[in-house]
Image (tube, grey):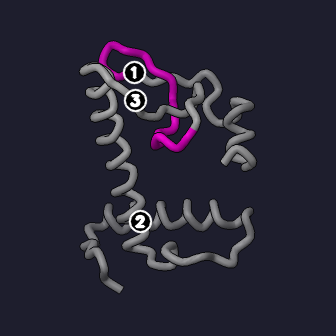
Amino acid sequence: FRNSGLFRRLQEGIYFPDRKISVGDVEMPVVILGDPAYPLMPWLMKPYTGALDTEKELFNYWLSKCRMVVECAFGRLKGRWRSLLTRSNLSQTNIPIVIAACCVLHNLCKSKGETFMAGWE
């Protein structure tokens, strides 16, 4: 991850330059959610590790719930577009375009009321 273009662009502030969102009365920076394997960065939120007090355990619980929403979304996307389950021979330039197209088509199907059936091929 540290050797990727994504990491470099995130470090340079290209993706989330001074962007903030409001959650209730709290203004927060836009971040990526990661698991404990990722490094803690200003743009990457990860769970606390080691001996935790109640406040840190609660933080980890809510962070985990948020990550589960993201993981479920990717699962649904891969369930609808089964080609995303296998390695692609597309160029690195085209992969984000294909994934974005799958997201748009998934949302279009959903807005038209198409029934989604996990495992359907």
Type of the residue with mark 1: Ser
Q: Secondary structure at mark 1?
A: strand
Which mark is first along the chain, 2 or 1?
A: 1
Q: Secondary structure at mark 2?
A: helix
Q: Which range is magenta?
A: 22-38
Mark 3 or 1, which is nearer the eye? 3
Mark 3 or 2, which is nearer the eye? 3
Of all residues shown, which one is farthest toward the front? 51
Q: What percent of the width, then of the height, locates residue 27?
A: 43, 16
Which mark is first along the chain, 1 or 3?
A: 1
- Foreground of the two, 60 or 9: 60
Type of the residue with mark 2: Leu
Type of the residue with mark 3: Gly
Q: Is residue 70 left or right of residue 54?
A: right
Q: Which residue is mark 2?
A: 77
Q: Which residue is mark 3?
A: 50
Q: Residue at x 56, y 30 (%)?
A: 40
Label placed on residue 22: 1
Which mark is first along the chain, 2 or 3?
A: 3
Q: Measure how far apart labels 3 and 2 are at the Cα level.
A: 34 Å
Q: Measure how far apart labels 3 and 1 are at the Cα level.
A: 30 Å
Residue 35 belongs to magenta span: yes
What is the count of numbered marks? 3
Measured along the vertical axis of the image, is residue 47 above or below residue 80?
above
